[in-house]
Amino acid sequence: MARPSRARRGNYQAPATPARRRRDRQPQHKPAQQTKSQAGAQRERRGGVRAFVGESAAELRKVDWPGQRQLFMGTVVVLIAIAVVGAYLAAADFVFSRFVQDVLLRGI
């Protein structure tokens, strides 16, 4: 048996038209903000080099520094990755150089 269309079921509302949506919408107000300073106004100095060094030192105290074992394992992983990528690039260079010499430059 065929299902009745949405309009016949009674719970369907047509989409609101753009004019209707604008009318129903509440006006939005921006919160009050401080006025922006003029382009030529001087910026406030906040502490300079001494504050920067102090904040940097505080951030470095928060760092979770690796132990000797983590450092060793990380170094091994990097060296293995370098060896794999180096071998791939060497093989690709050999293949492409042979291709260029034997196929592309054969007639020259």
Image (cartoon, rainbow, N blue to C red):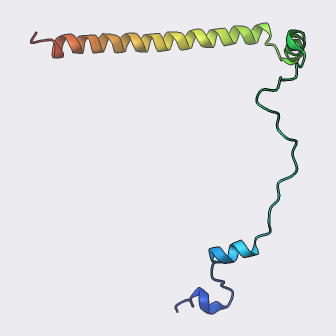
Query: Residue 13: which quarter of the image?
Result: bottom right
- Where is residue 82? Give x, y as percent: 53, 11
Residue placed furthest toward the left = 107
Tell me which residue sits at (83%, 23%) in the image: 42
Tell me which residue sits at (56%, 11%) in the image: 80
User: Can you say whether 39 is above or below 48 in the image?
Assistant: below
Tell me which residue sits at (63%, 9%) in the image: 76
- Where is residue 88? Give x, y as percent: 42, 15
For residue 58, side relative to residue 4 (left or right): right
* Along the viewing direction, whichever of 35 and 66 lies nearer the viewer: 35
Tell me which residue sits at (75%, 75%) in the image: 24
Say how many tags the image has: 0
- Where is residue 64? Give x, y as percent: 83, 17
For residue 8, side relative to residue 34 (left or right): left
Quarter of the figure that contains the C terminus: top left
* Along the viewing direction, whichever of 70 and 15 lies nearer the viewer: 15
For residue 30, side relative to residue 80 (left or right): right
- Where is residue 3? Give x, y as percent: 56, 89
Query: Residue 53: which quarter of the image?
Result: top right
User: Can you say whether 13 is above or below 67 in the image?
Assistant: below
